[in-house]
Image: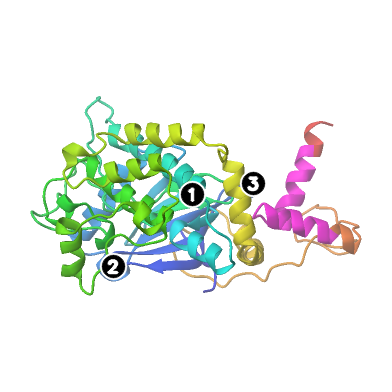
Amino acid sequence: MRAQKFGRYMLIDRIAVGGMAEIFLARQMGMEGFEKLVVLKRIRPELSEKKSFVTMFLNEARLSAQLNHPNIAQIYDLGKVGESFFIAMEYVFGRDMRRVIPKAEAQGIPFPLVYAAKIASQCCEGLYYAHQKSDFYGHPLGIVHRDITPENVVVSFDGTVKILDFGIAKAANTVEQTRAGEIKGKLSYMSPEQCMGKPLDHRSDLFSLGVVFYEWVTGFKLFTGESDVAVLKAITDGKIYSPSYFKPDVPEPIEQILMKALEKDPTHRYQSAWEMQYDIDRFLSENEFTPSNIHLANFLKQVFADEMDDELRRLSAQGTPLATATAEEEDDGAARPPVAPAPGPVARGESDGAEGAPALDLSPEQVEALERMATRHSITVSTLVREIVAGYLKFQ
């Protein structure tokens, strides 16, 4: 898509279209060349007049905005441009777990069990924070994510694990409560009580995380069927085989962790995400190799090297037209044609359009080096040059 202005954001690319909203990669713009990549979630135009959808969307924003944790994708802004409500949230430069393992296997690279454990541990940490979160008056919010799936767990290229999409999360005091018996979430990762439309608490998320972790460890999807009804029946009535049934070399501590998380009776499961994380971390500490975030980062960079280069080039190519718009422009959300990007710093004798700005006398090699540096940091060359000059002048 062509870059489009939307309030003080520039929409770079439409990532997805869901039942309720469109999701865009966008760039937030501010004073003095300030730029920040975000993910912008906007109510679909045809649904903006439907009160129930707007209420649900705003509830998501209010709920998610209260969560501030390294393992949860952050909410930055809630607003309205014209008739469109939107949420601006953290852009995580990485890949979700639905893509990580298949991509590695396609290249003949096995996904280490200890990496799965490390990621599951960080998920536990984020979930425990959300489950224990209270409002400003100290009243527990009673948050249940309800949609822990591989695509909602993202590992960034710096090795940080983030839980995404509290969009169907439920808090005990939300205005728009789910109707009795209504099922939300992706079927194969639901808890038995969620499948049956029963009241949920945080232990439902631990079952879902157990299903996801089981899949990462064994390579097999735990609950499948020829129809939705068959999947639901497998979750509520089917037998759960020990991970070693599919993969004999699964360590016993990991098998015990998974089977406890997957107890169909919530009273027999882990009673908190902290308890589950404790057991995972104890296994990792006793293992001969304990991966760090750097190990996760290096693994992802190896597996997705081709995609990283393509994505950085795409972001860099969009940089200049996005940087030309400012927050002072009319806030009407109308699409405007993008300005053609400049190839790099101007040579001596040319002008970059800034009043009084000196031209740069650079060799082709220097221009190329600046372009590589700008690409690595997802900013434009002109912004990079301004930052370098500003940093130099600061100490003069």
Residue stretch in magenta = 367-391
Label 1 sits on residue: 113
Q: Which mark is residue 32?
A: 3
Locate residue 151, reporting x and y percent. 40, 58
Label 2 sits on residue: 19
Quote the CA–CA distance across marks 1 and 3: 47 Å
Indicate which label's residue lies in the foreground, 2 or 3: 2
Indicate which label's residue lies in the foreground, 1 or 2: 1
Badge 1 density bin: few <14, some 14–19, many ≥20, Cα 10 Å? some
Viewer can see residue 172: no
Give the residue type that dot 2 points to.
Gly
Give the residue type that dot 3 points to.
Glu
For mark 3, give the secondary structure: helix
Q: Main secondary structure of the magenta part?
A: helix
Residue, x 15% and y 63% (percent of image)?
233
Q: Earlier in the sequence, mark 1 or mark 3?
A: 3
Residue, x 32% and y 37% (percent of image)?
130
On the rendered structure, is 318 left or right of 55? right
For mark 1, give the secondary structure: helix
Q: Where's the C terminus, which quadrant?
A: top right
For mark 2, give the secondary structure: loop
Q: Quadrant of residue 376?
A: bottom right
Q: Is residue 388 magenta?
A: yes
On the rendered structure, is 82 left or right of 235? right
